[in-house]
Structures are given as C-alpha cells and as structure tokens.
Image: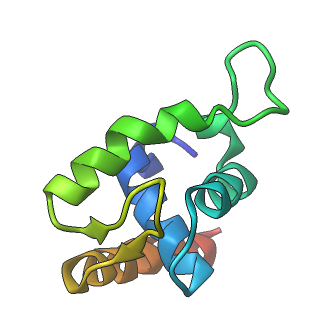
Amino acid sequence: MSNKEKKSLNDLIIFCIYSLRKKCSFEELAKECFSLFPEFLAFPKIKQWPDSRKLDRPLRGLRKKKLIIGNPKTLFSLTKLGKKRAEEIARTFQQRKLEL
C-alpha cells in the first residue's frame, strides 16, 4: 500500500471483523487480521508470526468509539456505526482494485 492508500490499524480491524461476517473470537480476529494484513500484525523480527498484542489498544479504542462491542474473553462484533464504517472501508478497497 502506498502512503496515499494506507489505512489505519483501526480501519483494518473493523474491516476484518466485517469480513468474517459473524461475531468472532479474539483468536479468529487475530488470524483474519494476520491473513489479510500481515505487514501490520507481524512481529518485527519474525515476519511469518502474528503479534496479537498489537490488537489490544486499538480494540479498546474501537469499543470506546462505539464501533465494536465485545472483549477478548467473549466475542467481538460491529455496532451499527461500526458496520457503516466497515462498508465505507470495503468500498475504498474495491475502488482501489478497480483502479489497478
């Protein structure tokens, strides 16, 4: 992704929850994030392994902004506001594919 196309980690997390199409556990979310965006979630020295700790602070922030509900001990899902944001993010990804 170029600087112009860079997404925030928050946006990528929202998109990953949306892409799972269901309530998801922390482990499912970490796997989805690492599968779709490994450059954001990989350990700095071991790029083939996910560092799920990178999700902790963003997930708390997304809950505070009322974009998601849930926590690592339960399941995560998008709120109505979060789903609206996820659909906006998905459209930007689709537009980028069309421009390529």
Q: How many labels does the image show?
A: 0
User: Which quadrant of the structure image shows residue 87?
Assistant: bottom left
Residue placed furthest toward the front: 73
Q: In which quarter of the image is the C terminus?
A: bottom right
User: Which quadrant of the structure image shows residue 3?
Assistant: top left
Residue at 63% from the left image edge and 52% from the top image edge: 30
**3 is higher (above) or lower (below) than 37:** above
The image position of residue 64, as x and y in percent, is 15, 54
Residue at 58% from the left image edge and 78% from the top image edge: 19
**85 is higher (above) or lower (below) than 46:** below
Residue placed furthest toward the left: 65
Q: Which of 8 and 51 is in front in this view?
A: 51
The image position of residue 26, as x and y in percent, is 56, 56
Residue placed furthest toward the right: 48
Snapshot colouring: rainbow
Q: Viewed as shown, does residue 10 lie left or right of 62?
A: right
Residue at 23% from the left image edge and 86% from the top image edge: 80
Residue at 19% from the left image edge and 79% from the top image edge: 81
Q: Nearer the viewer, residue 75 or 58?
A: 75
**77 is higher (above) or lower (below) than 32:** below
Q: Which of 89 and 75 is in front in this view?
A: 75
Q: Viewed as shown, does residue 51 lie left or right of 90?
A: right
Residue placed furthest toward the top: 45
**74 is higher (above) or lower (below) than 26:** below
Q: Viewed as shown, does residue 99 lie left or right of 62?
A: right
The image position of residue 33, as x and y in percent, is 62, 54
Q: Which of 48 and 51 is in front in this view?
A: 51
The image position of residue 36, as x and y in percent, is 69, 58
